[in-house]
Image (tube, rainbow, N blue to C red):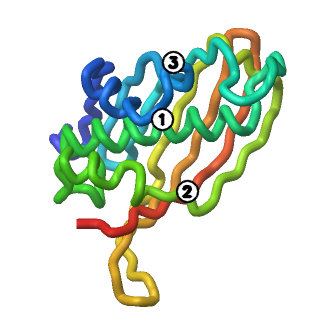
Amino acid sequence: MTTASVHRSYATDADLLERVLAPYKAHCKYVKSAVVTAGPELTSARCEFAIPESCYIDDTGHLNAVEVNIAYNQMMYYLVAKSVQEEALAGFENWTLDDFWRHQLPDILIARFTGSFRRPVNPRSFFGEMEFLSVTRRERGDGKPFLRAETSYRYWDADGGRCDGTATLAFVNVP
């Protein structure tokens, strides 16, 4: 087996997770743990989530579209930060953690987000996974470069709840 074909796994970095979630209000920090796996074809994160109380609506009893999006953002931010830290994600080889912190909120955009709710997911305790399927460098109409990333995600719980989807990301003002 060559080094290029080895998958590396990174357990939750509590300090990094805390910094990634710093922009969120205390009651909106949903990621509790995250394991990042990096390999030659795939970089992914598997997370544990808990949403004790919705941040915007009375209790629906299930994970809803807004919470899916917030959980996705948090999982994605952690996956990118950890991948930058470990130099584990194609397209981000020249990024530093300082680059990530500078770009985290203003320059990482969700261009498209889709989701399918298969069975209700318990928001109090559930799991999620996302994968970077591809990252390509492109140019905007004005000639400025950006990174386009295709991702997939899924959530599930212990009772068979299930939700999945895809998201296209645009990383603008890239170094």
Mark 2 or mark 3: which is in front?
A: 2
Q: How busy is the neighbourhood of tag 2: few (under 14 within 10 Å), some, or many (20 plus)? A: some
Q: Which one is in front, 28 or 170? A: 28
Q: Is the residue under label 3 in contact with that under label 1 (CB below 8 Å)?
A: no
Q: Quadrant of residue 119?
A: top right
What x and y, as percent, mark residue 68? 66, 35
Q: How busy is the neighbourhood of tag 1: few (under 14 within 10 Å), some, or many (20 plus)? A: some
Q: Which one is in front, 149 or 106? A: 106
Q: Which one is in front, 59 or 42? A: 59
Earlier sequence position, callout 2 versus callout 3:
3
What x and y, as percent, mark residue 47? 48, 24
Q: Amino acid at mark 2?
A: Ile
* SS type, badge 1: helix
Residue of label 1 = 74
Q: CA distance from mark 2 to mark 3?
A: 22 Å
Q: Is residue 134 above or below residue 164?
A: below
Q: CA distance from mark 1 to mark 2?
A: 13 Å
Which residue is painted at 74% across and 25% down in the image?
Answer: 63
Residue of label 2 = 110
Q: Is residue 144 above or below residue 113?
A: below
Is 169 displayed left or right of 63 in the figure?
left
Q: CA distance from mark 1 to mark 3?
A: 11 Å
What x and y, as percent, mark residue 139? 39, 82
Q: Amino acid at mark 1?
A: Gln
Q: How busy is the neighbourhood of tag 3: few (under 14 within 10 Å), some, or many (20 plus)? A: some
Q: Which mark is residue 25?
A: none
Q: Amino acid at mark 3?
A: Glu
Mark 1 or mark 3: which is in front?
A: 1
Earlier sequence position, callout 1 versus callout 2:
1
Residue of label 3 = 48
